[in-house]
Amino acid sequence: MPEEIRESWHFLGENMVSKKFRLAREVNRVDSTIIQLSKKDEEEVQGILEKNICISLHDHTIVFPEKPEEYIPYIRSGRWWIGYRGLKASGLNVVFDGMLDGIALIRSPDPWDWDNVIHQIGMIKADINRHREIAVVAESLGDIKRAYEENKIAFVLHLEGPPRIGEDIDKVDMLYGLGVRCIGVTYSRGNEFGSGLADKNDRGLTDLGYEFIDRMNRLGIAIDLAHVGDKTSLDVIEYSREPVFITHAGARGLWPTKRMKPDEVIHALAEKGGVFGVEAAPHTTLTKKHIKHSIESVMEHFQYIESLVGIDYVAFGPDTIFGDHVGLHKIFMEYLAITDKKDDRPSHPMVDYVDGLENPSQFINIIRWMVKNGYSEEEISKAIGKNIIRVVDKVWK
Ligand SMILES: [Zn+2]
């Protein structure tokens, strides 16, 4: 990658570059642990990065303002900056980018309003396409391989939930045409296709939901169950002709919240050939042993899923942002519907950030952790990319 990375929207001129929001630092925003290795082990990490396509199954590459008070005006401004410098430091070649997910309150107060979703896709593509010397929107495995060879970051457009399309399933074709290659069936709350993880009663996949799954299979869009209810997830896994992803979650066997997935769903996912991305958003993948959220808690979830279904079905979707993620959750708790009701949530200490996996730039710490804990190069290469490539090779056609 060339040394000079020009920031988002530089091509629009000085006024745009001197933006009105002071953005968070992309690297070393806080004093988050960098896993220390011997010289030999660090060389092994660098060797693994050189030889393998390194993929995050879910992150958000947008850089937020330094101050959470500015998050809403920044989002409503409809123009956001991408953390190219932070991504360069991460070791990642490919990122499934959730963009603004459920907080895109640009043209309508409903984040999943069609116009809000299309606005995000257009804006992110505009900036990436004008950074073509360092970045590309990947729509095929060929695009990913080419980007890796050319030392560019490949962005996979990933919607955590579908926009409101009602019965107009043809709109899924439009999303495909715009480059979207991974879509969640529901985003925490249920919709016309099925139930979300926040719903009291999971009614399973609806008739329209079956059509939605069928259309994604036909087009070649990867299906994501990260924010989907358990019963609806099992319906999707059974019905889909292709393997599916859980792009970012953890194991309920370790931490009993709805945001985590039960063993039954993890087994079904793996039996179908799908992949589970382990998540690291603050206060999600906790464990009793590592109750203060850190990379250690996240890796305990990784090891639990690995021991349940094997190394071929697990990957990482850290779900981090550039900026104060805990601050973001405080502001958007209601919109995101990410947490269970207070009374059925186990109590745990709150952290300011997830030590060791604070933002996308720290993805490399996962590889360091695996080397330090005796994983072989073969095992690491599967978890950081090969497993995901196996699925997209089949699903994207
Ligand atoms: Zn999410």
Image (spheres, rainbow, N blue to C red):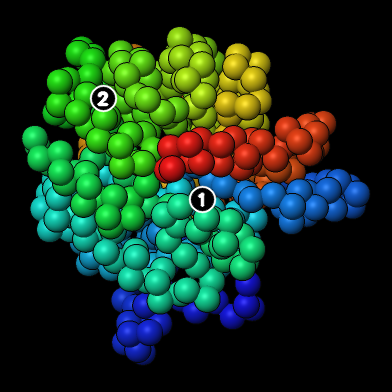
Q: Residue at x 21, y 44 (%)?
A: 172
Residue 80 image offset from top left, x and y in percent: 33, 66
Q: Vertically, is 136 above or below 36?
A: below
Seen as rendered, the residue at the extreme bottom is 14
Which residue occupies the foreground of this view, 66 or 126?
126
Q: Nearer the viewer, residue 300 or 269?
A: 269
| Residue at numbered disc 2 | 196
Q: Amino acid at mark 1?
A: Leu
Residue under the point 23% across and 40% down: 162
- Decide if residue 19 is in sight here: yes
Vertical order, 54 against 188 (above or below): below
Judged from the image, the secondary structure of the residue bearing numbered disc 1 is helix
**In front: label 1 or label 2:** 1
Where is residue 232? Give x, y as percent. Answer: 28, 18
Q: Which mark is residue 269?
A: none
Label 2: state its secondary structure.
Answer: loop
289 sits to left or right of 128? right
Q: Are marks 1 and 2 in contact (CB under 8 Å)?
A: no
Crowdedness of circle 1 by 10 Å Cα count: few (<14), some, many (20+)?
Answer: some
Q: Give the mark nearest the N terminus, 1 or 2.
A: 1
The residue sitting at the top extreme is: 264
Q: Quadrant of the N terminus?
A: bottom right
Q: Residue 294: x, y in percent?
A: 60, 35
The reply, left or right, for residue 169 in relation to residue 22 is left
User: Tag 2: residue type?
Assistant: Gly
Q: CA distance from mark 1 to mark 2?
A: 30 Å
Residue depicted at 29% across the width and 50% down the height: 176
Tag 1 residue: 141
